[in-house]
């Protein structure tokens, strides 16, 4: 029985470490996306990033707390994994929309403008 508890503790520690690495990656991706949306205003985009990070921390904590209340502490990692998956999906959607905007509103180069005029 003691061996089983140690095994669960090690598995939980590995999962939390992995989630921490993914959270860091997602924070970098989030800051890149926000900064890319407003390159002419870096101070504004940095403030927007910090606001989004704080709001995400607050909402994520509240949702995980609700998940713990409903399902119990045994499923705390499941709640974190659900939120991680949702974050990855939302970033993928944002990147897809950004790529679609680039292809639909491509500006003409100077050589193309000379050919027209």
Image (cartoon, helix red, strand yellow):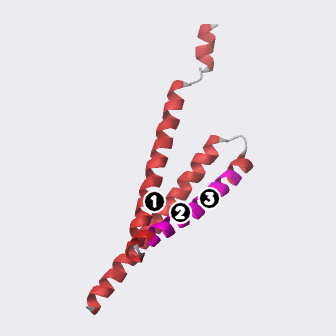
Mark 1 to mark 2: distance in Å?
7 Å
Q: Is residue 94 above or below residue 68?
A: above
Q: For mark 2, does the 10 Å Cα neighbourhood hold few (<14), some (14 to 19), or many (20 or more) residues?
A: some
- Label 2's element? helix
Identified at 34% across, 77% down, the residue is 11
Q: Earlier in the sequence, mark 1 or mark 3?
A: 3
Mark 1 to mark 3: distance in Å?
14 Å
In reply to whether residue 110 is colored magenta, the answer given is: no
| Horizontal side of residue 31 vs 97, given as left or right | right
- Residue 28 lies, in percent from the top left, at 55, 56
Q: Nearer the viewer, residue 83 or 27?
A: 83
> Pointers 1 and 2 in contact (CB under 8 A)?
yes
Q: What residue is shown with label 3?
A: 55
Identified at 44% across, 65% down, the residue is 80
Q: Earlier in the sequence, mark 3 or mark 2?
A: 3
Q: What residue is shown with label 2?
A: 60
Q: Nearer the viewer, residue 66 or 111?
A: 66
The residue positioned farthest toward the top in the image shown: 117
Assign the magenta stretch its main secondary structure. Answer: helix
Magenta part of the chain: 47-69
Instruction: Indicate which disc residue 83 carries.
Output: 1
Instruction: For residue 82, say whether it is visible.
Output: yes
In reply to whether residue 49 is colored magenta, the answer given is: yes
């Amino acid at each position: 029985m003691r061996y089983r508890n140690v095994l669960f503790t090690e598995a939980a520690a590995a999962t939390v470490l992995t989630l921490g690495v993914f959270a860091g990656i997602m924070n970098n991706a989030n800051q890149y996306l926000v900064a890319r949306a407003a390159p002419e205003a870096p101070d504004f985009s940095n403030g927007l990033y910090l606001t989004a990070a704080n709001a995400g921390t607050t909402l994520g904590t509240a949702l995980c707390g609700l998940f713990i209340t409903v399902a119990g502490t045994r499923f705390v990692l499941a709640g974190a994994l659900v939120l991680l998956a949702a974050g990855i999906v939302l970033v993928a959607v944002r990147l897809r929309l950004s790529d679609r905007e680039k292809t639909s509103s491509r500006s003409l180069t100077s050589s193309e403008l000379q050919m027209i005029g």
